[in-house]
Image (tube, rainbow, N blue to C red):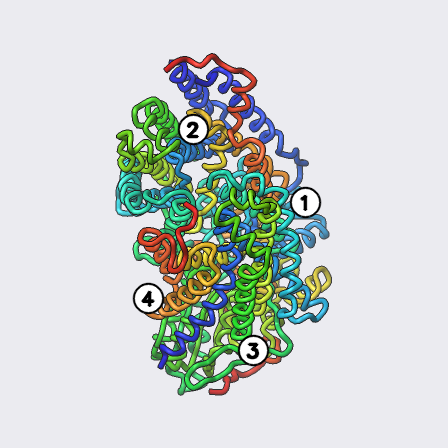
């Protein structure tokens, strides 16, 4: 039999080392700093998206600090964002969020990437009463929880489905048959379901509606099936790598349709660059696009100013996740200044009460925490570049159809 | 009519699956090692082809040899240096070891290349070949043809060359082979290296078809498992047959039951097979 | 006797942890207990019987979803946890019937595949939320109280599991399993009902893990298939047992503590290479320390073998 006393001793020594390293880890912080926790997937399956969020947060923090910091209650606070990598693993995201609150003593949180992880983390922000701003969560399931501390800068999935359904049917009465292919996880599935509702409401017929598993690398079966149904309009949801593959395989297998809509990849520049000529005339919707023009009272002041700052720091243009992330920071700042305090509960109330124009668009939150004041544009890729088809106020082109 | 297209999809896919799996099958059958690194080797091969094309304009089909050789070297070193120490140990140990090594290699690739999906966008793609109602994607068909060619070459190597015969000897009876003067340690390393070569070559072929990222390695590994159990371990014709059968089953299964069930289907098949006929369609009873 | 005393001392020490008032520490300790349960459970089938099972992830996810579904239909948490454990037990018994006749590699693969299949089945099944995941009801008590509640629940499970291990290791079942590990055919000839014993071990490896999955689901309030059927959940218990000492009683728990400590240190300081760090541990462990840390200790401090 083993020496039980010895094993107990070893266990307690190991635990002691562990405890010491954990407790000693927290840094001391200066008096006038606002700490915002941002657990992000910096490695793993959705790391490209995680890095986008980080860029958005950083550009905001830099802008805020460049102007001297955030002023509230007679004091000026420097902004510090605390990052941690949860490796695209949702339970880790939740754990990171909690650790940031209890150990790093952050006063506010930026949400992890995506509806799934945001939903999971929202339980933590709600438990601890820490306002959390989410730039990449759109699904109703999060806001139906009626939590008080979660706020999202993406409008509901129906706002990126209904406008395009209406636009296409208005432009062409011959578009009757719709084929839908959705990825089987929270956001892509939810947005595809909204789209299906929207086209049915317009009187169109959904001839096939299929889902594909996460990590599918071959869509030939689904595409063959869609082809057999002779659709006029093909819709697919997923993340950028899925959509690039689907578009190429559609071409390989001879699936043609007059309208091809993909959500949510074509809004990113990489899409057009990678699929080349196959990107032509692809339609998509995006919560924000550099082509919009808004003026506001936020730290950036206007869309153009934001675009210029982005170009200067990172080169190129921001996409909706990047802009949304910066917007989360800008909104937080506005709320702190309006509340005149950095107390989480007061700032929370200020966020809930916001009704203001920003570089990102008009910002106002519904009771469950979701923004309901945006008008996501409908976009079409022409010559590799996005053209705005709707709303009319910022339109820059007309819908084009692919050859039959 | 649609069944023709579905069947064609399945065969093309199946040829690729066969190529993915043959190296894995060899290592498992001969060395009795389940090489969890196999999927990661494939992805590494894809990256070699990708960078070759992006920086030097080398068409991925030519990169087959380059990727294969790079992986051969890596495989040899890994086997001779590390894996050989436990090659006679029980399953638990060897499986866990290759799992650990895979974590290291995969993470290294993630750090070096990031998880961003890359795609080889050929300047002159082969387009689609239309044969009646069936569309055959040109690049995939070419890749499949090359994959089958490679597999046949491997088969000839094992049958005809002296190294090939030594490998088969070791598979049949390790002790007897040693008595016959075969340097088992070297043969072990060569076998593993050949498996890695095939993985790298497959990766280069696949680079024009699938998106490239370290995150895909598990998917490839999963397919290799099923193909090996389907076709029988250590058997090259087995891997071919297994691959084609899996391709067909997945294609028709996706059509009948929906694409989201494709993975469940192939794994369910695996379980049924393990229950009913673990030695596979063609293979002899492999190692337990 | 000494073993029971040790268990009691450790239990007492851990039970007083909440007095430190550090929620994060409590969270870590809860995770250690969960890991210990998984490792200890794996030890029944992997360490004693010698069957390399990778089904831990399947049982964990199975328990998590069973409990989530029950709770969403109104069942109180603790009842749901108990039912989840029972369900996992039954599931394992059936599964065992299907795959326990396989040996070595084939058994390992089959057990690994089960988790993948379950994940995909849950992904597409109605009533589980599919790819969207499932919410669990949040307890209406304070955060500190919640942290303590889950800690004590996991601790109780871990202690119970270890107690079961102590009993079983010394029982006829344990003896029979060790015989099976050494030479299954010989054991069978000698009269050991290998089928029954293996199934028992496999079921034991499932029941506590299923409950751990259920408690975990309530703890994090939201589960989705890739998280609770994660292949790492199948591999880590193995690593922990190897670390601590295959087939021993306290080895798994020791391994759990060491692994968690290591993970936390790596996560804080070497974010981008945490997977590689785990991989490195595994490689070093397998190559140089296949009998675990306890074997090192036994070499340093040899005890007289008591005749049995």
Mark 3 vs mark 2: give the one in front. Answer: 2
How far, Cα to Cα, is label 2 from label 4? 44 Å
How far, Cα to Cα, is label 3 from label 1? 47 Å
Query: On the image, numbered disc 1 is attached to which residue?
Result: A78
Query: On the image, numbered disc 3 is attached to which residue?
Result: A278
Label 4 chain ID: B
Relative to the observer, which residue lies in front, A269 or C199? C199
Dot 3 or dot 1, earlier in sequence: 1
Residue B45: which disc?
none
Residues indicated by labels 1 and 2 sit on the same polypeptide chain: no
Q: Secondary structure at mark 4?
A: helix
Residues tagged 4 and 3 counted as in contact (Cβ below 8 A): no
Is residue A85 placed above or below A139 in the rendered structure?
above
Mark 1 vs mark 2: give the one in front. Answer: 2
Query: On the image, numbered disc 2 is attached to which residue?
Result: C247
How far, Cα to Cα, is label 3 from label 2? 59 Å
Relative to the observer, which residue lies in front, C273 or A113? C273
- Mark 4 surroundings within 10 Å by alpha-carbon count, few (fewer than 14), some (14 through 19), many (20 or more): few
Q: Secondary structure at mark 1?
A: strand
User: Residue A156 lies in what quarter of the image?
Assistant: bottom left
Mark 3 vs mark 1: give the one in front. Answer: 3
Is residue A56 placed above or below B137 in the rendered structure?
above
Relative to the observer, which residue lies in front, B164 or B223? B164
Query: On the image, numbered disc 4 is attached to which residue?
Result: B257
Q: Secondary structure at mark 2?
A: loop
Q: Secondary structure at mark 3?
A: helix
Estimate the x, y position of residue B118 in percent, counting from the top left.
60, 64
How far, Cα to Cα, is label 1 from label 4? 57 Å
Residue drawn at the location 53% of the way across and 61% of the way down: B159
């Amino acid at each position: 039999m083993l020496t039980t006393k010895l094993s107990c001793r070893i266990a307690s020594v190991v635990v002691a080392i562990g405890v010491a390293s954990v407790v000693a880890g927290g840094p001391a912080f200066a008096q006038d700093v606002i700490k915002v926790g941002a657990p992000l997937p910096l490695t793993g399956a959705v790391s490209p998206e995680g890095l986008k969020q980080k860029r958005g947060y950083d550009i905001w923090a830099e802008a805020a600090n460049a102007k001297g910091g955030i002023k509230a209650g007679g004091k000026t606070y420097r902004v510090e964002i605390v990052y941690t990598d949860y490796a695209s693993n949702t339970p880790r995201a939740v754990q990171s969020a909690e650790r940031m609150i209890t150990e790093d003593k952050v006063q506010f949180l930026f949400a992890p990437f995506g509806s799934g992880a945001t939903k999971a983390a929202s339980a933590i922000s709600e438990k601890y009463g820490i306002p959390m701003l989410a730039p990449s969560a759109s699904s109703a399931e999060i806001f139906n929880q009626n939590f008080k501390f979660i706020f999202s800068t993406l409008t509901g999935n129906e706002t990126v489905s209904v406008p395009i359904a209406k636009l296409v049917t208005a432009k062409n009465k011959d578009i009757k048959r719709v084929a839908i292919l959705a990825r089987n996880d929270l956001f892509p599935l939810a947005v595809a379901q909204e789209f299906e509702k929207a086209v049915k409401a317009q009187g169109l017929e959904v001839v096939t509606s299929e889902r594909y598993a996460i990590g599918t690398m071959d869509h030939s079966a689904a595409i063959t099936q869609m082809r057999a149904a002779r659709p006029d309009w093909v819709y697919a949801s997923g993340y950028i790598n899925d959509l690039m593959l689907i578009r190429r395989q559609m071409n390989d297998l001879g699936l043609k349709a007059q309208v091809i809509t993909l959500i949510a990849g074509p809004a990113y520049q990489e899409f057009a660059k990678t699929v080349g000529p196959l990107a032509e005339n692809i339609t998509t919707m995006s919560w924000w696009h550099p082509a919009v023009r808004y003026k506001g009272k936020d730290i950036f002041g206007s869309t153009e100013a934001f675009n210029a700052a982005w170009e200067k720091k990172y080169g190129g243009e921001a996409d909706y996740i990047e802009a949304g992330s910066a917007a989360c920071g800008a909104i937080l700042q506005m709320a702190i200044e309006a509340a005149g305090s950095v107390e989480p509960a007061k700032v929370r109330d200020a966020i809930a009460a916001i009704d203001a124009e920003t570089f990102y668009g008009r910002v106002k939150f519904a009771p469950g925490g979701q923004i309901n004041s945006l008008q996501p544009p409908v976009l079409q890729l022409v010559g590799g570049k996005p053209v705005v088809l709707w709303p009319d106020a910022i339109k820059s082109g007309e819908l084009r159809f692919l050859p039959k | 009519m649609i069944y023709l297209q579905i069947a064609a999809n399945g065969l093309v896919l199946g040829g690729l699956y066969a190529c993915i799996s043959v190296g894995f099958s060899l290592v498992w059958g001969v060395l009795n090692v389940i090489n969890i690194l196999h999927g990661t080797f494939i992805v590494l091969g894809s990256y070699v082809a990708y960078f070759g094309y992006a920086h030097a304009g080398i068409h991925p089909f030519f990169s087959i040899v380059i990727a294969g050789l790079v992986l051969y070297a890596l495989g040899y070193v890994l086997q001779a240096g590390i894996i050989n120490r436990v090659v006679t140990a029980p399953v638990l140990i060897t499986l866990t070891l290759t799992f650990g090594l895979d974590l290291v290699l995969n993470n290294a690739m993630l750090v070096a290349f990031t998880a961003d999906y890359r795609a080889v966008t050929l300047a002159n793609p082969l387009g689609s070949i239309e044969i009646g109602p069936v569309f055959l994607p040109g690049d995939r068909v070419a890749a499949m043809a090359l994959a089958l060619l490679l597999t046949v070459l491997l088969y000839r190597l094992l049958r005809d060359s002296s190294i090939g015969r030594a490998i088969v000897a070791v598979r049949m009876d390790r002790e007897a082979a040693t008595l016959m003067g075969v340097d088992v340690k070297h043969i072990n390393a060569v076998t593993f290296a050949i498996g890695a070569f095939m993985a790298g070559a497959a990766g280069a072929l696949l680079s024009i078809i699938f998106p490239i990222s370290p995150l895909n390695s598990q998917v490839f590994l999963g397919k290799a498992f099923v193909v090996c159990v389907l076709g029988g371990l250590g058997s090259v014709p087995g891997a071919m047959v297994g691959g084609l059968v899996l391709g067909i089953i997945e294609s028709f299964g996706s059509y009948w039951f929906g694409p989201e069930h494709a993975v469940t289907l192939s794994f369910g098949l695996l379980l049924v097979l393990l229950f009913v006929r673990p030695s596979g369609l063609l293979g002899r009873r492999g190692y337990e | 006797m000494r073993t029971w005393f040790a268990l009691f001392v450790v239990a007492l020490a851990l039970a007083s942890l909440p007095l430190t008032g550090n929620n994060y520490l409590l969270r870590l300790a809860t995770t250690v207990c969960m890991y210990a349960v998984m490792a200890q459970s794996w030890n029944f089938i992997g360490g004693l019987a010698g069957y390399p099972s990778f089904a831990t992830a399947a049982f964990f996810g199975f328990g998590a979803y069973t409990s989530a579904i029950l709770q969403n239909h109104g069942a109180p948490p603790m009842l749901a946890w108990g039912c989840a454990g029972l369900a996992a037990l039954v599931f394992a018994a059936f599964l065992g019937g299907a795959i326990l006749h396989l040996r070595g590699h084939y058994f390992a693969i089959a057990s690994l595949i089960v988790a993948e299949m379950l994940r995909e089945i849950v992904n597409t099944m109605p009533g589980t939320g599919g790819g969207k995941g499932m919410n669990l009801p949040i307890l209406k008590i304070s955060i500190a109280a919640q942290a303590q509640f889950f800690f004590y629940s996991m601790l109780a499970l871990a202690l119970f599991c270890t107690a079961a291990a102590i009993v079983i290791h010394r029982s006829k079942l344990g003896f029979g399993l060790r015989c099976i590990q050494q030479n299954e055919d010989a054991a069978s000839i000698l009269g050991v009902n290998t089928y029954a014993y293996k199934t028992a071990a496999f079921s034991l490896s499932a029941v506590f893990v299923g409950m751990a999955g259920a408690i975990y689901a309530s703890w994090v309030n939201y589960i989705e298939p890739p998280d609770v059927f994660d292949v790492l959940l199948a591999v880590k218990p193995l690593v922990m047992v190897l670390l601590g000492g295959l087939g021993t009683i306290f080895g798994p728990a020791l391994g759990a503590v060491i692994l968690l400590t290591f993970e936390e240190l790596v996560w804080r300081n070497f974010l981008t290479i945490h997977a590689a760090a785990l991989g490195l541990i595994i490689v070093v462990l397998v190559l140089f320390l296949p009998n675990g840390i306890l074997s090192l200790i036994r070499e340093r401090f040899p005890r007289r073998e008591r005749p049995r």
